[in-house]
Image (cartoon, rainbow, N blue to C red):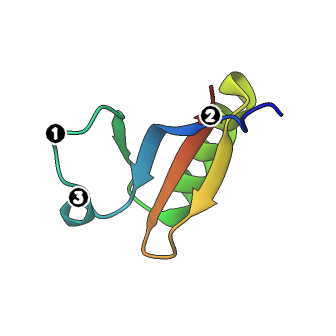
Amino acid sequence: MADAPMPSMFAIITTDKNTVLYGGMAPVFYAPNDIERDRVAMWLCRITNAIVHDLHNGTVILTVSK
């Protein structure tokens, strides 16, 4: 039986700089509002074939499967 692919965090997009701590491996993109956050997430998702996960606190993360 094959193992399931392991998702890894690809990027973080947030409207609140206080919700993301530094030191991780994923790049952090700051957006001035929810509309811009969603626009950036949409384009990164289309370009990289990632999956967007909304954390419902002004932050979304993008993951890709290895």
Q: Nearer the viewer, mark 2 or mark 3?
A: 2
Residue displayed at 74% across by 31% down? 46
Q: Circle 2: is it few (<14), some (14-19), or many (20+) Cα within 10 Å?
A: some
Identify residue for label 2. Answer: 64
Q: Which disc, if any, is residue 17?
A: 3
Q: Secondary structure at mark 2?
A: strand
- Between the C-alphas of marks 1 and 2, the distance is 20 Å
10 Å crowding of disc 3: few (<14), some (14-19), many (20+): some
Q: CA distance from mark 2 to mark 3?
A: 23 Å
3 or 1: mark nearer the eye: 1
Q: Earlier in the sequence, mark 2 or mark 3?
A: 3
Which residue corresponds to the image point at 44% horizontal and 49% vertical from the top-left? 13
Q: Is residue 31 above or below residue 15?
A: above
Q: In this view, which residue lies farthest toward the right? A: 1
Question: Compared to 11, does 34 lie above or below?
Answer: below
Residue at 73% from the left image edge and 38% from the top image edge: 4
Dot 1 and dot 2 residues touching (CB under 8 Å): no
Residue 47 position in % (x across, y down): 69, 23
Looking at numbered disc 3 in the image, what kind of residue is underneath it?
A: Lys
Vertical relation: 37 (above or below) 55: above
Q: Which residue is mark 1?
A: 23
The image shows residue 30 at horizontal and vertical percentages of 34, 47
Q: Name which residue lies at 79% across and 31% down.
A: 2
Quarter of the rendering containing residue 28: top left
Sooner in the amino-acid sequence: mark 1 or mark 2: 1
Say above or below: 57 vs 29: below
Q: Quadrant of residue 49?
A: top right
Q: Position of residue 38 (x, y in %)?
A: 60, 54
The image quadrant that residue 58 belongs to is bottom left
Q: Amino acid at mark 1?
A: Gly
